[in-house]
Image (cartoon, rainbow, N blue to C red):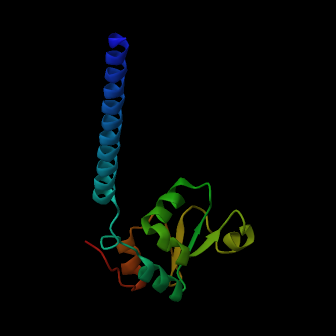
Amino acid sequence: MKKSKKRGSKKKVNERNNKILYIAIGIFVLIASIFLYSYFKPSDKGEVTFDNLAICLKANNVKMYGAEWCGYCKKQKALFGDSFQYIDYVDCDKNRETCSAERISGYPTWEIGGQKYSGVQSLRRLSELSGCELENAE
């Protein structure tokens, strides 16, 4: 009878120790998660947008002609990020007549002040060609 009592009390001690260990691991994981989240969380302060440039381009009747499948067009769009939504974009697959009338032969093509510029243009170049200010430029 004494042996079973000792085994029972040892078993309870082990169970209690396991519970403490699991709680300690849980607390550690929680603290580590909070730390990692706060360390890697994107900061609103450092986020760069080109909304003003894109809005100015549209206001100055600047257009970009392209196609959804065009890799260079995707690269051009990526330069603007979310600000591309403000660009006057003509999808030549959906507007073939317009692109044909404008004599668009390659993508992307920018139309600025009556002149056409083929290929991916840097934001700085678009700023220079259009007269629109490029903010957040390094």
- Residue 50: x, y in percent? 41, 76
Residue 26 vs residue 65: left or right? Answer: left
Q: Residue at point 36% right, 29% down?
A: 15
Q: Does the rendering let one see residue 87?
A: no
Q: Position of residue 13 (x, y in %)?
A: 31, 27
Query: At 59% from the left edge and 69% from the top edge, which residue is drawn?
Result: 65
Asked if 3 appears above or below 59 in the picture, the reply is above
Position above or below: 102 against 9: below
Res 130 quadrant in image:
bottom left
User: Which residue is found at the position 69% from the left and 69% from the top?
Assistant: 100
The reply to whether residue 129 is in sight is yes
Q: Judge by depth and name the residue closer to the eye, 34 or 71.
A: 34
Q: Indicate the position of residue 40 as horizontal and vertical percent values.
A: 31, 56
Question: Which image quarter is the N terminus in?
Answer: top left
Outermost residue toward the left?
Answer: 138
Q: Is 131 in front, or is 137?
A: 137
How many numbered circles does the render carry?
Answer: 0
**Residue at the limit of the structure toward the bottom, as seen here:** 59
Q: Position of residue 24 (x, y in %)?
A: 29, 41
Relative horizontal placement of residue 27, taking residue 129 as reference (left or right): left
Q: Nearer the viewer, residue 71 or 110?
A: 71
- Quick check: 107 left or right of 45? right
**Residue at the location (67% across, 66% down)?**
92
Residue 48, quarter of the rendered image: bottom left
Q: Nearer the viewer, residue 136 or 89?
A: 136
| In the depicted structure, whether residue 72 falls above or below residue 80 | above
On-image quarter of the C terminus: bottom left
Q: Image height check: is 119 above or below 123? A: above
